[in-house]
Amino acid sequence: MRREIIYAQLNNPQKGITDIVTRTNNCHTDTRMRKYYQAALLITAVVSLVSLLFYRHEYNRLRYVLEYFDYFGKPSQEASKVNCPKEKVEIEKIYVGLNEPLSAWQRIDDDLYVYSSYVTNNRKIQTISYGKLTNPNLDCNVFFEDLLTPIPGIFSFTIIGNTSDIPGRTAYRGYGLICEYTENMIPVGVTFQPRDQILFNANSPLLAVKNQAKSLTYNGSALCIVPPLNIPISRSEMISFLNFHELVGMNHFVIYDYGIPNAFHKAIRKMAQDSHPKWNFTYEVVPWNFPIREIHPNVIRNIIEADCLYRTFNKVMYAATVSWEEYIVLKYHHVVSDLLIDFERTKMYGNRYVVQTQTFCTQQKDDKRSTNSTPIILRKTLTSPNALDANHLYIYKPHESLNVKNIKTLKTAANLIIVNRYVSCNDYNANNVESNKYEPSILRFAGDIQSSPIYRRFIAGKMFDFE
């Protein structure tokens, strides 16, 4: 405490009487008052800042609404008075036509078979074939609209890669038979016959030619599914496959059919055609009567992949060839095409994307949290050793891959996308589970999988109730 003299006056000079006025200052009181002032200023500043941010938020909302009305116009008063009755919301189904052409294997001679024919952007008919063709010893004839007689074409061929794995038949492989024409007309059919037959052979197999669109018409994604490794395959496994890939946007299915019951096809087609607001997929079936038995599955897969590229050309943005046992799993995204588009935005561009795979042996014990009705992809969570090197999968852009000489391939990161394979392992050892790796990435989709209307309909027993 401090005392100050602030006034002094001499009242009586003879007696020396003086009036003295003093003031006492309290330092602690001044300090406390100063802190109060600072706190009040701080509170005022915070309130002002919050008010400013709130004002800015409301201003932006109002500006957005005004811009919306400026662009789209104001809603009419009459429309706002209409009472819409409650009705079922329907989604317009997109017909992609991936079952065209409806192909089947036909024999040209004892060593060569043909399956399907396509025309893309050039005047060349591409035919998928398999067999023995060591020399260009064929002639081709092209049928055109409004012409009764065929016109000879120019024959050549290409080799479909990795399709010569048959022991003792190294000359047997997949081929792309090319018949080039010069006429400015639309081809509707093509035949191939040995070159030593000078005249046109009317008994030669006639393949219908599918003329694909000149430009990309749809930005969807398709899966071409090879025949199952083990026949018969259970309904639950096929439903699990279709349900999961519909969730991740690979929802246009082309089934290369060998051994799947017609009742299953009928039920899934019925669902696909149903205008249900909670699912949107197409389901197309093409025959696969491959003429040679005991052939390696990879040969079948590579031939189907070649056909798949032409079949989906300019019909979808992305296409991949998979088996019923394989699942394309995203680590962060929810739709496959979203990830691929993000690659392009960051200049990671390719005509096709290669995805690593990992194998889950189905002999392993189920996850402790699963039940009997849980899909197998949620019950098996341990990968086998060296699983990343087991195989790989290509996701193509068909409209680009068939128009370039050298396909640019982009390798995707396993921490973004990977393929899970659920197969029976020949070398599985139940006593060596310590070497397996826990891989729960697909579990992030567990809720969506088990609550999806497709899965719930199957579990309720309503999917095949027409039987």
Image (cartoon, helix red, strand yellow):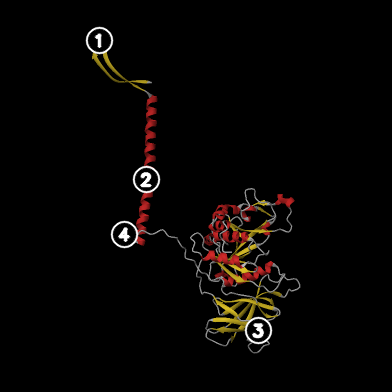
From the image, tell me which residue sits under label 2: 52
Front position among marks 3 and 1: 3
In the rendered structure, find residue 373 and report the number of the disc placed on it. none
Specify the quadrant of the image occupied by residue 102: bottom right
Residue at image location 67% in from the left, 62% down from the top: 391
Front position among marks 4 and 1: 4
Which circle's residue, 2 or 4, is located before the other in the chain? 2
Q: CA distance from mark 4 to mark 1?
A: 99 Å
Q: CA distance from mark 2 to mark 3?
A: 82 Å
Q: Position of residue 145 (x, y in %)?
A: 53, 83
From the image, tell me which residue sits under label 4: 77
Which circle's residue, 4 or 1, is located before the other in the chain? 1
Task: Identify which amino acid the numbered label 1 is placed on.
Answer: Lys
Position of 163 compared to 343: left or right?
Answer: right
Q: Quadrant of the N terminus?
A: top left
In the rendered structure, find residue 15 and report the number of the disc placed on it. 1
Q: Height in image: 279 above or below 198? A: above
Task: Identify which amino acid the numbered label 3 is placed on.
Answer: Gln
Circle 3 SS class: strand
